[in-house]
Amino acid sequence: MKVCEVISVGTELLMGQIADTDAQAIGRMLPELGIAHYHRQTVGDNLDRLVGALRLALSRSDVVITSGGLGPTEDDLTREAIAAALGVSLELDEPFAEVLRRIFASRNLPWVDSQFRQAQKPVGAEFIDNPNGSAPGLWCRRESKVIVAMPGPPGEFLPMLAGPVRERLIREF
């Protein structure tokens, strides 16, 4: 039986400013898929603590699912933390950067260069499509371990969890 750990990312969650409904949704889904769920962590927007949480989770679980921290702002640190925990660097995905530019242009939104953060991924990671927002999810494999990272807003997170993430977890585990 595969074991999963959930890491919720965001100081607003840690401080109780918003409820962690993402972790609740994951907790309901995992037993349906036959995946054990023994641990859950909530980490504020701090790179060192998030890297530590990921390393701990990888030491005791086959799958780590994160929620939050994938946006364009300076405190969105999940992709950097995953790269550090896996011992790889970040790479800019130029084709996805162009997709982002088109998304912003089609919505008449101003472009700022910090949006490029969303086009970065740990080397070897795959993007998970996000039709409801600009931050894609990430599927990162290292040997027999997998990290799945999804954006935190429920309108983006829930469709991603119920669709492509659920389907891939079923296929692979």
Image (spheres, rainbow, N blue to C red):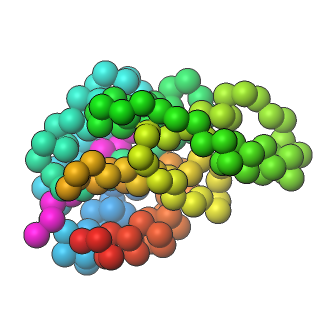
Q: In this view, does 72 lie to the left or right of 3?
A: right
**142 relative to 73, above or below:** below
Q: Which residue corresponds to the image point at 38% horizontal and 23% vertical from the top-left?
A: 46
Residue 148 on the magenta span = no
Image coords of residue 151 (percent x, y):
50, 49
**26 relative to 133, above or below:** below
Image coords of residue 118 (percent x, y):
60, 40
**84 relative to 68, above or below:** above
Q: Which residue corresponds to the image point at 17% horizontal and 37% vertical from the top-left?
A: 56
Span colored in magenta: 1-10
Query: For the image shown, how many numbered marks are present on the structure?
Result: 0
Q: Can residue 173 be seen in this view?
A: yes
**29 relative to 156, above or below:** below
Image coords of residue 156 (percent x, y):
56, 57
Q: Which residue corresponds to the image point at 42% horizontal and 30% vertical from the top-left?
A: 89
Q: Is residue 43 visible?
A: no
Q: In this view, does 131 lie to the left or right of 86?
A: right
Image coords of residue 173 (percent x, y):
24, 71
Residue 7 on the magenta span = yes
Residue sitting nearer the eye, 131 or 94: 94
Q: Which residue corresponds to the image point at 51% horizontal and 58% vertical from the top-left?
A: 128
Q: In this view, does 19 lie to the left or right of 85?
A: right
| Quadrant location of the N terminus in the rendered image | bottom left
